[in-house]
């Protein structure tokens, strides 16, 4: 099963990080208020990044690592500057 990491931007410009096997389904859950409590009542949500990770255990480790990043570092992921691949590589050693 393929796992993905994704970032959602809230109306107040915060970035939420999550993992899923189906990004579109999960984003629609967040939009309808059935996703994470952290996103409920946060206004308009936008999916700003998603990337394929691979297996579940790797997705969990990458999610944790990204949640430790500063907002500025997360914004670099959104812009697609290659930092996602670098983080993924640091965890897999490939």
Image: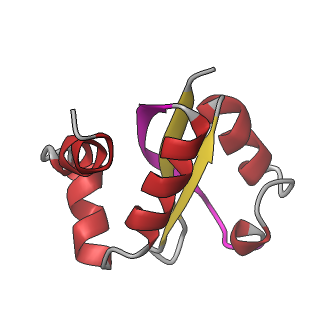
**Residue 49 belongs to the span the image colors magenta:** yes
Q: Is residue 59 above or below residue 7?
A: above
Taking the view exactly as shown, the residue that stands out farthest to the left is: 81
Please report the residue visible at 66 percent of the width from the left and 68 percent of the height from the top. 43
Please report the residue visible at 40 percent of the width from the left and 65 percent of the height from the top. 65
Residue 33 percent location from the top left of the image:
83, 58
Please report the residue visible at 52 percent of the width from the left and 36 percent of the height from the top. 4
Question: How many marks on residues?
Answer: 0
Image-based side of 74 in relation to 44, left or right? left
Of residues 43 and 18, the one drawn nearer to the viewer in this rendering: 18
Residue 51 percent location from the top left of the image:
40, 35
Q: Is residue 29 above or below residue 38?
A: above
Magenta-colored span: 41-54
Q: Is residue 57 above or below residue 68?
A: above
Of residues 60 and 13, the one drawn nearer to the viewer in this rendering: 60
Image-based side of 35 in relation to 15, left or right? right
Q: Would you say the magenta stretch is mainly helix, strand or loop?
A: strand
Residue 81 percent location from the top left of the image:
13, 47
**Residue 26 belongs to the span the image colors magenta:** no
Please report the residue visible at 52 percent of the width from the left and 45 percent of the height from the top. 59
Q: Quadrant of the C terminus?
A: top left
Q: Quadrant of the N terminus?
A: top right
Q: How is the image coloured?
A: secondary structure
Taking the view exactly as shown, the residue that stands out farthest to the top is: 1
Residue 87 percent location from the top left of the image:
26, 51
């Amino acid at each position: 099963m393929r796992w993905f990491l994704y970032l959602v931007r809230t109306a107040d410009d915060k970035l939420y990080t999550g993992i899923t096997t189906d990004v579109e389904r999960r984003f629609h859950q967040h939009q309808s208020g059935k996703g994470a409590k952290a996103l409920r009542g946060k206004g308009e949500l936008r999916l700003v990044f998603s990337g394929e990770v691979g297996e579940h255990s790797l997705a969990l480790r990458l999610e944790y690592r990204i949640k430790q990043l500063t907002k500025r570092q997360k914004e670099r992921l959104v812009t697609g500057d290659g930092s996602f691949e670098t983080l993924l590589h640091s965890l897999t050693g490939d």
